[in-house]
């Protein structure tokens, strides 16, 4: 049984973590968070989202955040750009990497982005073309890969079909998201085996939610499948909109604790990461979602 | 990669979960909890502890609890009996299975039970002899198998040495406990490989604490080592005395969720288990430690 020697952690806290927060968070606090994550050694930080402020008011200041953060050489500062307008705003803000997102479930695609899966993929074609011209790389997300809040089960073949299209279009990496956190390790492995038949495993990432406490074990199951890129959120920022009070994103600290224990390199400093999490939790006035942070506070 | 088709869950909530609760819990509430766990289909419930009420006041009513619970045929109702006096009280209460506990760390043994590891093992000899005469089976616990709050690292060889002695003395099963929850999957596997060199794996159990969020992934790693008996606590009852506010025992609901997802049989009904957890959390006035329970409430 072999594991990757190195894992790349994609920190989604400033975007995926904060986007559903009801209270306004200042640009200064967001900048502070991104800078603290940079200092902690993260190599990829998803900073914001270029979407209509009508839909996601919390992400309205993304251009200002990009303008004010410290840009450390070698670190990727990414942003969501779900449509052409958002892409153009991202380019204007100096963003060098964008992400697009599709769903593996037809019902989720309709309810979440108001179009079918194939319509959403068609929209990405001109974005990815324009990105190539600007030398901007594009990451693809697929949501609901291990279950859908509306459809229930989602087949691994369906996930593979959507992921394959995103990869064929030019996404350099496809992140497979267990949006509702219902996945367990066997399903995780089956899903990666299905997707891995079409896309090299080093081009895949896992994005696990801890709603049912399964995120870490699913990451371990993914490591066994040769996956070595994982999305996570400092302090577990970002609840689950489908189960109030429950966890959403897996906490970066808890993933790092496991990887450190396994001797897998990430380049991330635990103490600095804990400080970043503690600070943003104080700003938000909320309890950390990281078990490691809770244990260290005790 | 193969997994056991069946897992035996050892429910430790009524004993390990409640023993550190500061507020008094009535015998009636304990009986209600044990009966609800019986109804949920658990095959082994650790009901109480026959120790000096001076040391563990919460367990003072264990004999009354044993007298009042429903005894379902085929279900084992166990109790801790750390010394001869406790063993005799357990026998008088009609207990058919007892457990003894040793530590893998010398410092923990001294501070927790006031004697060296070898002294603690010597004390178990007459208990196990007496148990044989009464037709009572004895389960052995080893604590601090993946770390000690006083010594830090604990070697897998040291764990194996203690476990081997308990097994040789006549314990039919040895439960290996990550008392402070610092274990990660690689260390878990190394530990089971070391112990498995001396004791058949079907005679071993895993007892993981979720203090750093690692319990489920360690259980998965254990399943990969052929271990198929795990201790857990409904609603994650029982905090971690070494990290205030942090989790202790892994929640039975969360373990069951993973095993159900993997198609591994346990005989436990999730809905009834959730009800048992909800009820005792209401009695204690505390929030459940189970992520599954939190998500279901949402």
Image: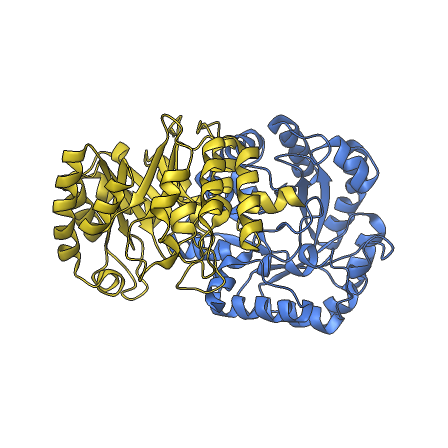
Chain colours: A blue, B yellow
Residue A238 occupies quadrant = bottom right
Q: Residue A60: percent from the left, percent from the top? A: 81, 62
Residue A157 visible in image: yes
**How many numbered marks, from 0 up?**
0
Check the picture and name the quadrant holding the N terminus of chain A. Answer: top left
Residue at 56 percent across and 47 percent down: it is B291
Q: As rendered, which of A234 and A79 lies closer to the eye?
A: A234
Give the side of residue B90 with respect to residue B126, left or right: right
Residue at 52 percent across and 67 percent down: it is A274
Q: Residue B154: percent from the left, percent from the top? A: 26, 57
Q: As rendered, which of B145 and A264 lies closer to the eye?
A: B145
Judge whether B251 appears above or below B269 on screen. below
Residue A117 occupies quadrant = top right
Q: Residue A84: percent from the left, percent from the top? A: 83, 49
Give the side of residue B205 with respect to residue A230, left or right: left
Quick one: which residue is furthest to the right in this view?
Answer: A54
Judge whether B114 appears above or below A201 on screen. below
Give the side of residue A247 with respect to residue B24, left or right: right
Q: Residue A104: percent from the left, percent from the top? A: 69, 34
Q: As rendered, which of A232 and A84 lies closer to the eye?
A: A232
Residue A2 visible in image: no
Judge whether B292 appears above or below B200 on screen. below
Residue at 53 percent across and 66 percent down: it is A273
Q: As rendered, which of B151 and A298 lies closer to the eye?
A: A298
Give the side of residue B68 with respect to residue B164, left or right: right
């Amino acid at each position: 049984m072999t594991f990757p020697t190195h894992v790349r952690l994609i920190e989604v806290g400033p975007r995926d973590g904060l986007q559903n927060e009801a209270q306004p968070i200042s640009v200064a606090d967001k900048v502070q968070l991104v800078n603290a994550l940079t200092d902690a050694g993260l190599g990829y930080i998803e900073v914001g989202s270029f979407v209509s402020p009508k839909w996601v008011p919390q992400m309205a200041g993304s251009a200002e955040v990009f303008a004010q953060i410290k840009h450390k050489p070698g670190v990727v500062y990414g942003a969501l750009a779900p449509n052409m307008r958002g892409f153009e705003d991202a380019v204007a803000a100096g963003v060098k990497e964008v992400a697009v997102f599709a769903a593996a479930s037809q019902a989720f695609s309709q309810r979440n982005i108001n179009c079918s899966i194939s319509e959403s993929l068609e929209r990405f074609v001109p974005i990815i073309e324009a990105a190539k011209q600007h030398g901007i790389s594009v990451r693809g997300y697929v949501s609901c890969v291990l279950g859908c809040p509306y459809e229930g089960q989602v087949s691994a073949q369906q996930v593979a079909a959507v992921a394959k299209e995103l990869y064929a279009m030019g996404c350099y990496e496809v992140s497979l998201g267990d949006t509702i956190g219902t996945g367990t390790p066997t399903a995780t492995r089956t899903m990666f085996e299905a997707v891995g038949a079409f896309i090299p495993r080093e081009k895949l990432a896992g994005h696990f939610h801890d709603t049912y406490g399964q995120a870490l074990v699913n990451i371990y199951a993914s490591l066994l499948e040769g996956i070595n890129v994982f999305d996570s959120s400092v302090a577990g920022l970002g609840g689950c909109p489908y189960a109030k009070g429950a966890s959403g994103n897996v906490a970066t600290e808890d993933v790092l604790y496991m990887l450190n224990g396994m001797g897998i390199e990430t380049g991330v400093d635990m103490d600095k990461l804990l400080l970043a999490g503690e600070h943003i939790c104080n700003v938000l006035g909320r309890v950390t979602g990281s078990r490691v942070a809770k244990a260290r506070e005790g």
